[in-house]
Image (cartoon, helix red, strand yellow):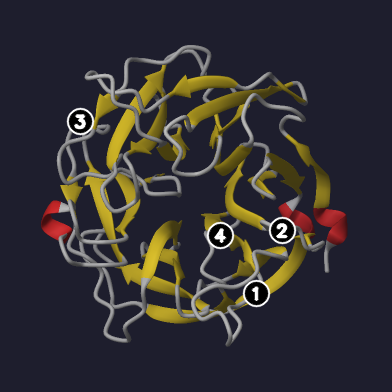
Amino acid sequence: MASHALLSSGFIYETAPYAQAHASTVVQIADGAIGAAWFGGTHEKHPDVCIWFARLDGGVWATPMQVADGVQPDGARYPTWNPVLFQPSGGPLILFYKIGPNPFSWWGMVVASQDGGRNWSKPRRLPNGVLGPIKNKPVMLADGSWISPSSTEAGEGMGAHAGAGWRLHFEISRDQGRNWIVTAPVESPLNIDAIQPSVLLHRDGAIQAVARTRQGALASTWSRDAGRTWSPLGAINLPNPNSGTDAVTLQDGRHLLIYNHSAHAPETPGKGPRWPLNLALSDDGVTWRNVLTLESEPVPAGYAYPAIIQAADGRIHATWTHDRRRISHAVIDPSKLE
């Protein structure tokens, strides 16, 4: 495989004031710097879990700073979850995240930064029924609309999606996030349980979403009306051990996906090892080929919840959880991926 495509790889930080970290997100900020965020605390679901952020300037990561927590006005405290950074054209840097005791009853939050992540606005709760991007970044269409990939994991407390279980849906804003339209859940006639989609943009105007599943393979759905309606879920030719993925459409029109190239074992249905961590490439979103292994050495908690973007200079930036302890960052040259 194209190991020469990997330009650099390392940790965003070496030590931290918390035991565990997870669910990173990466973005190129309007000023050109790379930003990353993740949640960190005693362990996932612990009330002390907060959102952390760092900037990469001049090849050096700044010391991470805490930018959000789950403290409520009445003094109650809940864990934070799954930050998602988004840099819309001509707007501030946006950070979406969740607060709540668990993914069944969490709610969406958002903060914004006018200075590239150095300072952040007061947290604002998203409207009822709007969760925000669940794990992966929104995309901006040519008309300025935002499509936010979202999902639910259980029905309780989810309003219109009550009782739905693991279902994908999308949230669309045509006014820079002030108002949102929530699509109907994506149909799944094959009984594929899917969450955490990422969005790809095809040259013919089609939009595709690729998602994590419980069924041992990644799933895909398509829209041909700017995200308003979506095709029934179907599987694609890549394994999935019930672990998060992310994907990006490259400047040359190809599609790149970061994922764990493994599937669940018969003795552990619906769950498998979160290693190795790989990149897969596709010309059409249908047929995918494994092109690069980023991590292969087994570690207890694996390499999980990756995020991926392409910067303006063409280079790929990817982040992921390393053994639930630190966040890794890699830079990749996509011209050397075949």
Of badges 1 and 3, the one in the foreground is 1
Q: In the rendered view, does 74 fall on the left or right side of 207?
A: left
* Distance between mark 1 and mark 4 Cα atoms: 26 Å
| Nearer-N-terminus badge (1/3) | 3
Q: Are marks 1 and 3 in contact (CB under 8 Å)?
A: no
| Nearer-N-terminus badge (3/4) | 3
| Nearer-N-terminus badge (1/2) | 1
The N terminus - image quarter:
bottom right
Q: Amino acid at mark 3?
A: Arg
| Nearer-N-terminus badge (2/3) | 3
**Is 263 placed above or below 172 here?**
below
Q: In this orientation, does residue 338 appear? A: no
The C terminus - image quarter:
bottom right
Q: Residue at x 41, y 35 (%)?
A: 80
Q: Label 3 belongs to which residue? A: 178
Q: What numbered label is drawn on residue 157?
A: none
Quick one: label 3, few (<14), some, or many (20+) residues within 10 Å?
A: few
Quick one: label 1, few (<14), some, or many (20+) residues within 10 Å?
A: many
* Distance between mark 2 and mark 3 Cα atoms: 42 Å
Q: Label 1 belongs to which residue? A: 262
Front residue of 110/312: it is: 110
Front residue of 130/312: it is: 130
